[in-house]
Structure formats: structure tokens, C-alpha cells
Amino acid sequence: MYRPHPFSWVPADGQRHATTDPKPRHGYHGVAVRTLCSKKVTVDSSELGWLWPTCPSCNTGAHELAGVPEAADSED
Ligand SMILES: [Zn+2]
């Protein structure tokens, strides 16, 4: 059975971070959240934000929360 992961990806501060904060009804944009890398950031879900690189610390934390091993570096 599929269970949604207990976190969401949010673009903020030049990187895509993951947060376990509940999603506000109007979405995360402009909302201050606590990220998995223990930063307090304000979400910027503009179009550009989704092109930012993934925060390595949040990526690791997200994999732990999801209960899956981190994928090895994929080859391009
Ligand atoms: Zn992060």
C-alpha cells in the first residue's frame, strides 16, 4: 500500500529543501518552515525555485524518513 512520505520538498534560500511541517491550506509559498537540515527558511515556490539544486542534507534526511537507501550517484 502506498503511503505518502511525511515530508515535502520546498524551494528556499537557493536550494530545494525538505520539511516535515504541515502544508498550509494556501501552500508553502512565503511560509517560514523548519527544514530537515535544521534551517529556518522562507519558502519561495516561484518557478525558478524548483530549478535550484537539492540540499544534500535534506536529501539524506528525506531518504531516511522514507525508509529507502540513498541512491548511488547516477551516471549521466
Ligand atoms: Zn536542506
Image (cartoon, rainbow, N blue to C red):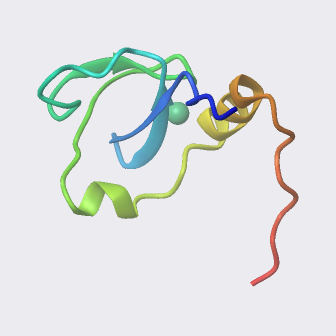
Place of residue 70 in the rendered image (x, y in percent of width and height, measured from the top left): 82, 45
The part of the image, by quadrant, that contains residue 65 is top right
Q: In the current view of this chain or complex, which residue is farthest to the front?
A: 1
Identify which residue is drawn at 35% across, 15% down.
22
Q: Is residue 62 above or below residue 35?
A: below
Identify which residue is drawn at 26% across, 34% down.
43
Place of residue 28 in the rendered image (x, y in percent of width and height, measured from the top left): 23, 30
Identify which residue is drawn at 65% across, 40% down.
59
The N terminus is located in which quarter?
Answer: top right
Q: Is residue 10 above or below residue 65?
A: below
Q: Nearer the viewer, residue 57 or 19?
A: 19
Q: Nearer the viewer, residue 16 or 14?
A: 16
Place of residue 25 in the rendered image (x, y in percent of width and height, measured from the top left): 16, 22
Identify which residue is drawn at 76% across, 27% down.
64
The part of the image, by quadrant, that contains residue 62 is top right
Place of residue 72 in the rendered image (x, y in percent of width and height, measured from the top left): 88, 58
